[in-house]
Image: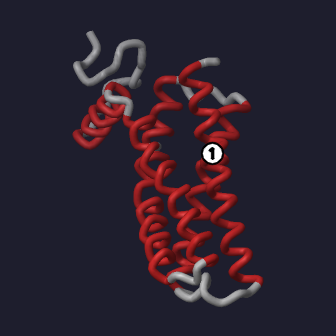
Amino acid sequence: MAPPSEPRGVDLGPEPVTPLGRMLQVVMGQMLKHHAHPISVHFPNGVLPVAFVFIVLSVLFESRVLGTAAYCNLVFVVFSLPVVLFSGYVEWQKRYKGFQSRQFMIKIACALIVFGLSVVVVIWWTVNPDILQVPSSGRTLFILANFLALGAAGVAGLIGGKLVFKD
């Protein structure tokens, strides 16, 4: 009989031999049972568009306050994405058996692009806090990087919705 943490229809693999392995298996079972990936992905995917709007408004109105709000939102995105990526990986491996379809590969690539670009723009902004205040080609590239991260998040979300709702 499956352990109580294992969702129906999902094989968590052989019983681990180490306490850490058993704990990880319980955590993964709970993540699947309680739909950790679709829940956790809503946080960065909801905050990322807000951050982008704040970036655009910060530039348009030359507002440091809106820029600071955007920066704080992007830091939140960077810190929330590891949970999203891990829960997505667990979901893909356990529920979908690691099936390597074109949809999954695009979704994974988009997730890695969002994470990579988010880390880059937060570091860039930390090193150069005036990036939005001074008109330059660097500012344009910075805004473009944020726009690309937003687009990649949208594509990943669209594919995820199609996988879940199968329409």
Quick one: which residue is furthest to the top in this view?
Answer: 1
How many numbered marks have been drawn onto this rendered protein structure?
1
Colour scheme employed for the rendering of this structure: secondary structure
The disc labelled 1 sits on which kind of residue?
A: Gly
Q: Is residue 127 left or right of residue 106?
A: left
Q: Residue at x 47, y 55 (%)?
A: 47
Q: Residue 103 versus residue 46: which sits nearer the camera?
A: 46
Q: Secondary structure at mark 1?
A: helix
State the residue position of label 1.
Answer: 154
Q: Is residue 104 left or right of residue 47?
A: right
State left or right for residue 165 relative to residue 2: right
Q: Residue drawn at (52%, 81%), measured in percent from left and top?
A: 63
For image coordinates 49% across by 70% down, the residue present is 70
Residue 82 on image: x %, y %: 44, 53
Q: Residue at x 59, y 25 (%)?
A: 163
Where, by quadrant of the figure, is residue 79 drawn?
bottom left
Which of these two is toward me, 71 or 36? 71
